[in-house]
Image (cartoon, grey):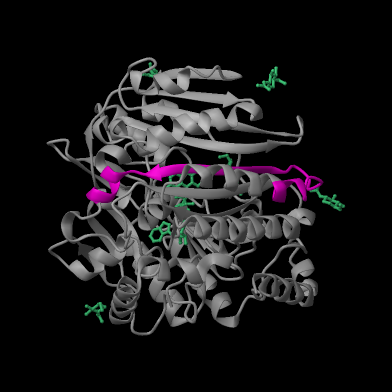
């Protein structure tokens, strides 16, 4: 079934090859999206160009534009515009709807599929200038621009001795991160990012700017907590801030023959009581293939939200001698500040979630290794099996202020799995796609056989091929409620796959 979808995709891509080559884009791994700029988009760009001056760019004069994934970097939009505030976003949207021109919205731009945040032959609405961080006088909240990056927010808050529920990598956008979920080193204490937003400033499909909170438009507030890019363009998030000093992180790596021993300890940590009681704690692991060594390595990140070297919660894990260990104490701004290379590697993410099972971890890593070994010849191959829990505390925190849209149906913990692969040449696209799909299918069957499968698919890690599983994974009731809210707030379907904002994981 999945293979058929892939085949269809590549057939359509090859029938598009002429127009793709004409635009100088890569001939491989493209989807069936048309690269031809419509008359409406030509007209919209002409009008935007007259209105936005130096905040407007045609792609042949936009060499400074970078975006994380090379497949998105290769995309040619009709034009790109950088609005500075909600009024300008509304003005852009009015022009696009008037000319019926398709578009994409870029927050931090960390998506992995064409058209997710760089528009294929339409207009890329780049929120990068909307990145202001304003801290409230009492220090309990900050108003964060919808295009701010994680590192910018951490750095601005560091200077006040504060922090927020942000991610692990500084270049990731608060926009996409928070609209989809947002798992953080602070989630064991405060919950996911989407459960720490008090208010959204949002531009609706008809160009209205509105403020959304649990008492002002509670339905839309529910929908924005997990609904992704289906409801509006968020120009500001008012988020919880809290006192926070420097934190401890230790990156560790282990020889493959130590993996089972380490997993025993990691499993005990994730499922034991100490994780819930010692809320400063977080731990995630990466099982990665290295072409240089032709072997797999288990890497664990120990995190503790206090400036304590080697906190006791990790003492059992630390009895296993790692190959390497780099402990560090720094502020979140410093910890996440180093820039990621942009537009260099091609990337694919896919995801699953499971209830805790120790045998599952062993079986899943074995399946992943077997599938990766089949595609070792892919250039620049860097595959990772990443896993960490959504902790019990984070699941409890989901019930605040009317609850979120994710529909997590367990008290937790729930293990999140991310199959994340980077590679360097389009000639590897098909192999990585099939490795990822085979791994997901087999890991899913293994979870089902062990009785630990879970319906939840994290939207921010889901592949395009998993689009149809994301919202059903929120539960039928939540999915229906989201669809009703979507249709009520966007009756023309501008933000749906049949409208103008078509990229990323669509509800309708
Ligand atoms: C290196 C890396 C590290 C990551 N680390 C973490 C992590 O620690 N925890 C975690 O939970 N996830 C993590 N992720 C996943 C991340 O949360 C998603 O990729 C997320 O969608 C990225 O958001 P973005 O704004 O950077 O990307 P974009 O591609 O700009 O946005 C993703 C989608 O959201 C939409 N969008 C963005 N901003 C807005 C807005 N203001 N209003 C309306 N729509 C908007 C876009 O249109 C797009 O469709 C990581 C991803 C990468 C690549
Ligand atoms: C690219 O950035 C550089 C340095 O900031 C600037 O001097 C140059 O004008 C920019 N080029 C374009 C085409 O915007
Ligand atoms: C694991 O591999 C390392 C490096 O090859 C080796 O030194 C060590 O003896 C091995 N340990 C076991 C238990 O096999
Ligand atoms: C963070 O970085 C700044 C600037 O480089 C430095 O002055 C400061 O000491 C660092 N602080 C911590 C706790 O890492
Ligand atoms: C990708 O691979 C093709 C064929 O193997 C090769 O011709 C091309 O130069 C490679 N491109 C890059 C960017 O390495
Ligand atoms: C825009 O849409 C919102 C949500 O449906 C609605 O409340 C509002 O009245 C609409 N505004 C206009 C001017 O049509």
The residue range painted magenta reads: 370-397
Residue 6 image offset from top left, x and y in percent = 69, 70
Residue located at (32% from left, 18% from top): 307
Residue located at (56% from left, 65% from top): 464
Q: Between residue 339 and residue 8, name the one nearer to us.
A: 8
Residue 468 image offset from top left, x and y in percent = 50, 72
Is 378 included in the stretch rendered in magenta? yes
Which image quadrant is residue 9 in? bottom right
Looking at the rendered structure, the number of numbered marks drawn on it comes to 0
Q: Between residue 342 and residue 317, name the one nearer to us.
A: 317
Looking at the rendering, the quadrant in which ligand 4 lies is top left
Which image quadrant is residue 138 in? top left
Residue located at (71% from left, 76% from top): 8
Which residue appears farthest toward the bottom when viewing the image? 492
Residue 89 image offset from top left, x and y in percent = 37, 64
- State whether residue 242 appears in this view: yes
């Amino acid at each position: 079934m999945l293979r058929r979808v892939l085949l269809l995709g590549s057939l359509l891509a090859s029938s598009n090859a002429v127009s793709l080559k004409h635009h100088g884009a890569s001939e491989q791994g493209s989807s069936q999206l048309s690269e031809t700029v419509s008359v409406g988009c030509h007209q919209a760009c002409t009008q935007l160009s007259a209105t936005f001056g130096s905040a407007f760019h045609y792609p042949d004069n936009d060499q400074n534009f970078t975006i994380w994934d090379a497949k998105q970097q290769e995309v040619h939009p009709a034009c790109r515009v950088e609005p500075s505030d909600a009024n300008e976003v509304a003005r852009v949207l009015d022009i696009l709807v008037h000319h019926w021109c398709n578009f994409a919205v870029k927050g931090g731009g960390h998506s992995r599929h064409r058209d997710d945040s760089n528009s294929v032959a339409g207009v890329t609405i780049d929120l990068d200038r909307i990145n202001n961080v304003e801290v409230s006088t009492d220090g309990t909240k900050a108003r964060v621009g919808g295009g701010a990056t994680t590192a910018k927010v951490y750095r601005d808050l560091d200077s006040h001795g504060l922090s927020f529920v942000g991610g692990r990598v500084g270049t990731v956008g608060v926009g996409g991160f928070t609209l989809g979920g947002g798992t953080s080193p602070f989630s064991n204490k405060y919950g996911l990012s989407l459960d720490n937003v008090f208010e959204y400033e949002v531009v609706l499909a008809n160009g209205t700017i509105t403020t959304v909170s649990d008492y002002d438009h509670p339905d839309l507030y529910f929908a924005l907590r997990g609904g992704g890019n289906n409801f509006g363009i968020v120009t500001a998030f008012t988020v919880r801030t809290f006192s926070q000093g420097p934190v401890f992180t230790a990156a560790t790596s282990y020889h493959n023959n130590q993996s089972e021993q380490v997993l025993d300890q990691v499993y005990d940590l994730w499922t034991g009581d100490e994780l819930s009681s010692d809320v400063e704690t977080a731990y995630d692991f990466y099982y990665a293939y290295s072409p240089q060594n032709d072997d797999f390595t288990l890497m664990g990140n120990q995190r503790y939200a206090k400036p304590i070297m080697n906190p006791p919660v990790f003492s059992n894990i630390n009895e296993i001698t790692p190959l390497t260990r780099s402990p560090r104490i720094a502020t979140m701004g410093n910890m996440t500040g180093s820039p990621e290379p942009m537009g260099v590697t091609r990337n694919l993410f896919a995801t699953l979630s499971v209830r805790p099972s120790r045998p599952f971890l062993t079986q899943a890593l074995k399946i992943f290794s077997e599938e990766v070994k089949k595609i070792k010849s892919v250039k620049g191959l860097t595959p990772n099996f990443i896993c960490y829990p959504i902790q019990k505390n984070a699941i409890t925190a989901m019930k605040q202020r009317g609850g979120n849209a994710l529909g997590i149906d367990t008290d937790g913990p729930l293990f999140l799995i991310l199959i994340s692969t980077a590679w360097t040449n389009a000639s590897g696209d098909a192999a990585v796609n099939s490795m990822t799909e085979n791994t997901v299918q087999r890991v899913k069957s293994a979870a089902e056989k062990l009785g630990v499968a879970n319906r939840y698919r994290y939207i921010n890690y889901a592949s395009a091929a998993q689009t149809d599983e994301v919202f059903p994974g929120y539960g039928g009731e939540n999915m229906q409620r989201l669809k009703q809210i979507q249709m009520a707030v966007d009756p023309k379907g501008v933000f749906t796959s049949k409208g103008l904002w078509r990229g990323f994981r669509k509800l309708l």
